[in-house]
Amino acid sequence: MRCLWLICIFLGVVLVQVKCGNPHGVVLEDDDFAEFEEFDEDEESEEPVRETETGQAATEGEKESEDAEFEDEDEEEVQVESEEDEFEYFEDEEEFENFDKDKGSASKTKGGEKLPDLQMAKVPLHLRTNWDSFYLEMLMLAGLGVYFLNFLAGKTKNSRLATAWLSAHKDLLENNFAIVGDDGTGKEPTQGVLMKESENVYALWCSGRTCVEGMLVELKLLKRQDLVNVLLRLFKPASDQIIMHVTMEEKKMDKFVFCVAQKKAAARLHKDMYDLSQFTEKKSVEKYELPGSYQLLSESGEASSAMLDKKLCQVLTKFEGIVEYIHISDQFAGPKSQDDTQPTKPPDAKPTLVFCFSVGSKGKSSPMDMEALKPLLQLVFYCVDKVSRFQLSKEARSKAEKKRQKVEEQFMKAAHGQRQEAAQQRREEKIRADKERLMNEEDPEKARKLEERENRRDMKKRQPKMKMMKV
């Protein structure tokens, strides 16, 4: 019954909290809770009774003593810490070992000492921009911007130079070839197409001329679109190059190998090119009245005298810094193979004329420099006509044929040596396999027969061969 009254009291308190402030304007009278006040008075008037473990009622004095004990325990549990006790652990000096007591504002403690207040560090705002922390990113973006601008400028200049060369030489090419600038993509030949192989390499194919299969013009310009290459050229200057490959028809050129080049280029060509390393020797150019910067690589003195006539020497002298080399050969096969193995047969060779011209000084080319190269293109056609008409003497041709036959024999010997080496290696592998089989044989009788067979074979090989007597 008592629990029921407690529940009612609890519900009343809840109703009072909900209705606090009298939101609906309800007027409460003083007699509304009179019923509960009567019950409180009855409970106060009743005398508390306590039974012991044996079932007897305890005296009022014992009850009061027990109530005092419970009150003491409750006071101990509900004891509130004072403000001084709450911050007592701040007095531990070991807790703040490196804290400077002289800084900050002082606060009072229970011992009378003044300790500084803790201060919060000033933290910058989360979205505050500190540009000093992004200098690496800014440098990278600036570098990318410079690289992109250099790419556009270099690409545009190379395209302008290639177009200037074609426009300056197109009339002369069309007068000497039936087809100029065919890209080979369609059934019908096209005209005036300058093929772009890369941002700095352009090609032009021409065909339709007597004694000539075709001519390939390569414009190998500097890599102006590459910023790294531009910076390297500050320490190692270079120039644009125009290389012309003229392939002659079969039997329209006699058997000789000839080259006149700048000294640095001559040393490189003599080392790398197959025909120059096999057939030519270094000779002086003094008797031909050429500048000392040139070097002559020739197989036959007769061919050298025929090629280096007065007109060619005048052009070489006039364009001394532009003509890199002129290479004329009936055994042209390109550069040597970079493999360490010795080739077993001579490479495929075709009669070819190669002309290399350097444009501009230290890479400073302009469209005007391209227009000034017309005499060099005329020199190319002059050399083509001269080579097609030139004939060696019988003695010089005989020497050239013997030299070519000797080179073929060297290749044949190299191929024969490689075949012998391969056969010897196969024999050694067979002997090694037979010995392994003999060692792995478990039957002693069979192993003995195999050993006897090997011994008989070795003895037969060691016996001298008898020559048959002719009757």
Image: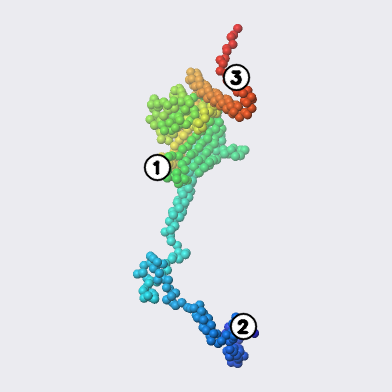
Mark 3 or 2, closer to the camera = 2
Snapshot colouring: rainbow
| Mark 3 residue element | helix
Q: Is residue 120 visible?
A: yes
The Cα atoms of the two marked residues, 2 and 1, are separated by 116 Å
- In this picture, residue 142 sits left or right of residue 112: right
Q: Earlier in the sequence, mark 3 or mark 2?
A: 2
Q: Which residue is mark 3?
A: 456
- In this picture, residue 290 sits left or right of residue 349: left
User: Looking at the image, which is closer to me, 63 or 428?
Assistant: 63
Which residue does the image show at 42% across and 26% down from the upper left?
Answer: 282
Up-down relation of residue 59 to residue 468 (above or below): below
Badge 3 density bin: few <14, some 14–19, many ≥20, Cα 10 Å: few
Q: Earlier in the sequence, mark 2 or mark 1?
A: 2
Q: Which mark is residue 27?
A: none
Q: Which residue is mark 2?
A: 55
Badge 1 density bin: few <14, some 14–19, many ≥20, Cα 10 Å: few
Which residue does the image show at 53% across and 23% down from the upper left?
Answer: 413
Q: Position of residue 96 (x, y in %)?
A: 40, 67
Residue furthest front as drawn: 54
Residue type pointed to by label 3: Arg
Q: Which residue is mark 1?
A: 235
Residue type pointed to by label 1: Phe
Q: Position of residue 457 (x, y in %)?
A: 59, 20
Q: Position of residue 71 (x, y in %)?
A: 51, 82
Q: Position of residue 93 (x, y in %)?
A: 39, 68
User: Looking at the image, which is closer to me, 99 or 311?
Assistant: 99
The Cα atoms of the two marked residues, 1 and 3, are separated by 73 Å
Badge 2 density bin: few <14, some 14–19, many ≥20, Cα 10 Å: few
- In this picture, residue 161 sits left or right of residue 114: right
Up-down relation of residue 57 to residue 222 (above or below): below
Q: Earlier in the sequence, mark 1 or mark 3?
A: 1
